[in-house]
Image (cartoon, rainbow, N blue to C red):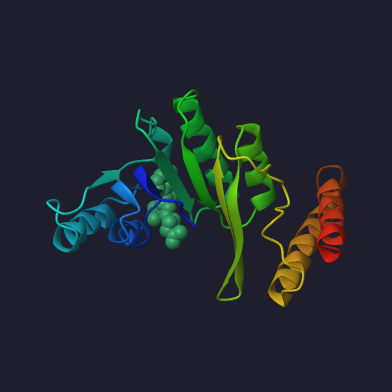
Amino acid sequence: MIQAPYSTVWDCCCDHGLLGMSLLKDRCADQVIFVDVLENMMASLADRLARDFPLDQYSWQVRCDDVKNIAVPDADSQLFIIAGVGPHQTIEFIDSLCASAPDRPFDLLICSVHGNYSVREALINQGYKLKDERIICDKNRFYEAIYVSKSADQPLIETGSPMWNWADPVHQDYWHRTVGHYQQKAKNDPVQFQPIVERYKVLRASIESA
Ligand SMILES: C[S@@+](CC[C@H](N)C(=O)[O-])C[C@H]1O[C@@H](n2cnc3c(N)ncnc32)[C@H](O)[C@@H]1O
């Protein structure tokens, strides 16, 4: 999905660093910065990078740190990827990156584990617009890849919009699971969650007729 090149891509919560390594290989950025809190993992990642991506040919850094400690530096074009953590943490990271440099533009590629409605709300509150979005089904689990920029021109919608293809049974399955999830939550907290259920129903009507 990434519309390269960026001067710097940050692979936040990188774990083994597989995503950032594939970006290095594809030359998606001048530099890739890997960030995770796991000390041992970061030490072995640094060893592997030194072996497979020598610094005379590639540019990378490994930072063993909490994403919330990152202050977005001044750079030409930057992308922060936050993938594989839950919605609460994802939103904390988005808000903390934005707070660290309110006037410095940077793109985000988000792939949260669940809770995409609230993640999208947080992105909208920070002024982000849509570059691209996809529904991903992997090992019977669903994810949304949400690629945003403040300078993009499509609106970002809480339920997702262009990613939906109602002719695709996988997307229908994802819609049913998502609505079922919020219907369950609406049983305990109808004020917060029933409007979300209704938004997904309106979305379905619009994508079915498209
Ligand atoms: C499931 S892995 C995600 C790996 C990869 N991004 C992916 O999508 O496959 C989650 C990673 O987030 C890291 N993590 C959790 N909280 C973090 C924080 N506050 N700052 C940096 N890394 C964090 C964990 O150490 C773990 O390696």
**Residue visible at 73% across and 52% down in the picture:** 159
Q: Is residue 189 visible?
A: no
How many discs mark residues in the rendered view? 0
Q: Quadrant of residue 123?
A: top right
Q: Is 95 positioned to the left or the right of 117 in the image?
A: left
Q: Quadrant of residue 165?
A: bottom right
**Residue 152 x, y percent position in the rendering:** 58, 40
Q: Quadrant of the C terminus?
A: bottom right
Q: Is 18 positioned to the left or the right of 185 in the image?
A: left
- Depth check: give the residue in front, 165 or 196: 165
Q: Residue furthest left?
A: 56
Q: Is residue 41 visible?
A: yes
Q: Is 42 positioned to the left or the right of 187 in the image?
A: left
- Depth check: give the residue in front, 205 or 14: 205
**Residue 147 x, y percent position in the rendering:** 55, 49
Q: Residue furthest top?
A: 103
**Residue visible at 28% across and 61% down in the picture:** 25
User: Taking 21 as reference, is 176 above or below it?
Assistant: below
- Depth check: give the residue in front, 102 or 167: 167
**Residue 198 x, y percent position in the rendering:** 87, 52
**Residue 197 x, y percent position in the rendering:** 83, 54
